[in-house]
Image (cartoon, rainbow, N blue to C red):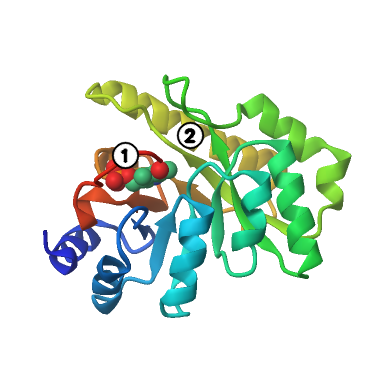
Amino acid sequence: MNVAENLNRIKAELPTNVQLVAVSKTKPEEDIMEAYKAGQRIFGESHAQELKQKYADLPKDIQWHFIGHLQTNKIKYIIDYISLIHSVDSPLLLQAINKEAAKRNVVANCLLQFYIATEETKYGLSLAEARQILESDWFKTMRNIRVCGVMGVGSFTNDIQQTHREFANLKETFDTLKACYFSTSSTFSQISMGMSGDYHIALEHGTTMVRIGSSIFGNRIYTNK
Ligand SMILES: *Cc1c(COP(=O)(O)O)cnc(C)c1O
């Protein structure tokens, strides 16, 4: 695996409006530096403590994205420097992020994660739950959250039609929320969908951010997310 070659091959496939998040979870800092030297600046991690260490050690112009399930008690490890949290999957988490961000007088960029897959192990909101959040009085008073779009993780499946349906569904959710709640907002603009196995399909459905790990860095030794 040559990280720079992999990166360049993937970047050549992406339209200019699609951002590449290089998913470096479980990978050593040397691998991240290889990608960094090849020009990559956006990296995705899914464990708060692992991210905290990497942030401390690595160049400060890296934009760190949090893509995993975030526990409220871990927000404090990442809130000072995180560029984007992809995985807001509950009202409680959103409120907790707002609170931590307020303490530090920062605004946290977030995506709402939607449950689009068939696997019960995956996280995410339904459209109805998202509507409840966006229409609530408490949401309107939040000053330290910026909702930048939506995120979803497709099913782990060989059924290509299934993946097409899931990504079409997430795109539709984005369009609905945009029309109902963010029609005048230019910041609500991101659709984070597509991983190593399915990003080509995500491109067909209007993704703006692909999260790619193993196709850049090779397979992960252990597969916990
Ligand atoms: C691990 C992970 C990825 C990257 O997966 P690959 O299949 O290695 O590209 C993308 N998104 C999320 C949410 C992940 O947890």
Residue flagged by tag 1: what amino acid is it?
Thr
Q: How far from the left and from the top, in percent, is residue 116?
A: 47, 27
Q: Quadrant of residue 138?
A: top right
Residue 150 visible here? yes
Ligand 1 visible in quadrant: top left
**Residue at 24% of width from left, 45% of height from top?**
221
On the picture, is 87 further left or further right than 146?
Answer: left
Q: Is residue 156 above or below residue 82?
A: above
Residue flagged by tag 2: what amino acid is it?
Leu
Q: How far from the left and from the top, in percent, is residue 148?
A: 60, 54
Q: Name the residue under label 2.
A: 170
Q: Which quarter of the image is occupied by the N terminus?
A: bottom left
On the picture, is 95 further left or further right than 192?
Answer: right
Q: Nearer the viewer, residue 35 or 13?
A: 35
Q: Name the residue under label 1.
A: 223
Judged by depth in the image, the label closer to the viewer, 2 or 1, is 1
On the picture, is 11 further left or further right than 121?
Answer: left
Q: How many labels does the image show?
A: 2
Q: In which quarter of the image is residue 79?
A: bottom right
**Residue at 32% of width from left, 71% of height from top?**
40
**Residue at 52% of width from left, 29% of height from top?**
115
Secondary element under disc 1, as helix, strand or loop, is loop
On the picture, is 51 further left or further right than 73?
Answer: left
Q: Residues within 10 Å of mark 1 (few under 14, many from 20)?
A: few
Q: How far from the left and from the top, in percent, is residue 84?
A: 55, 59
Q: How far from the left and from the top, in percent, is residue 96?
A: 74, 48
Q: Which quarter of the image is occupied by the C terminus?
A: top left
